[in-house]
Amino acid sequence: LLLVGMICSIGLFVRFTFAFFAIPIVLLFLYTRWRASGNCWKNVGWNLLSLALSFLTMSLLFVTIDWYYYHYLSPGRDADVTICKSWSCYLDEFLATVSKYVVPWNAFRYNSKATNLAEHGLHP
């Protein structure tokens, strides 16, 4: 179950439309686990919790890696970025700029704008 959450996170960060393909499969997987547990709703809650925690952990790892690379290690980084010397400084900067590094959300926002679709065209 932890692996399913991790795979869903990887798929979503590679291509945000992966969610449309993964949701029916994950729901079927959860349904079969519910049936195997004797229709026990308590087990469904624990399954959802472990799936969500593994998904969120992997997603946070991806966002943190992207943030660290593009915020500090990228050759074209902003000149006004200060190099932190403590964990609290890293955490403050991360929370202030994290929205720029959530790849699926940014891809969805970019592809939702009509001007961007007009520039790149629609796929058949």
Image (cartoon, rainbow, N blue to C red):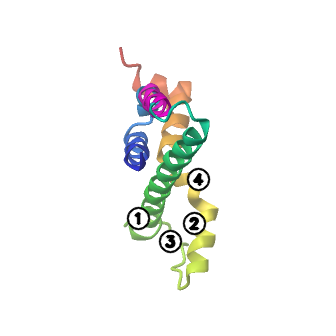
Which stretch is magenta? Answer: 24-35
Q: Are marks 1 and 2 in contact (CB under 8 Å)?
A: no
Which amino acid lies under the numbered mark 3 shown in the image of this protein? Ala
Q: CA distance from mark 2 to mark 3?
A: 17 Å
- Point out the tag, 2 or 4, that comes first from the N-terminus: 2
Verify whether residue 15 appears in magenta.
no
Q: Which residue is mark 3?
A: 79
Question: Dot 1 corresponds to which residue?
Answer: 69
User: Which residue type carries mark 1?
Assistant: Tyr
Residue 85 can be seen, yes or no: yes
Give the CA distance from mark 3 to mark 4.
20 Å
Task: In the rendered structure, find residue 103 and report the number of the disc placed on it.
Answer: none
Q: Position of residue 21 (x, y in %)?
A: 41, 27
Q: Earlier in the sequence, mark 3 or mark 1?
A: 1
Whole-number angstrom distance, CA of label 3 to CA of label 1: 15 Å
Residue at 55% x, 38% y is: 44
Which callout, 1 or 2, points at the residue further toward the start of the chain?
Answer: 1
Q: Are marks 1 and 4 in contact (CB under 8 Å)?
A: no
Badge 2 is on which residue? 94
Image coordinates for residue 50, horizontal then vertical, percent: 51, 49
Q: Residue at x 45, y 59 (%)?
A: 61
Q: Residue 33 magenta-drawn?
A: yes
Q: Which residue is mark 4?
A: 99
Asked if residue 17 can be seen in this view, the reply is no
Give the percent coordinates (x, y) of residue 17: 43, 30
Could you tell which of marks 3 and 4 lies nearer the N-terminus? 3
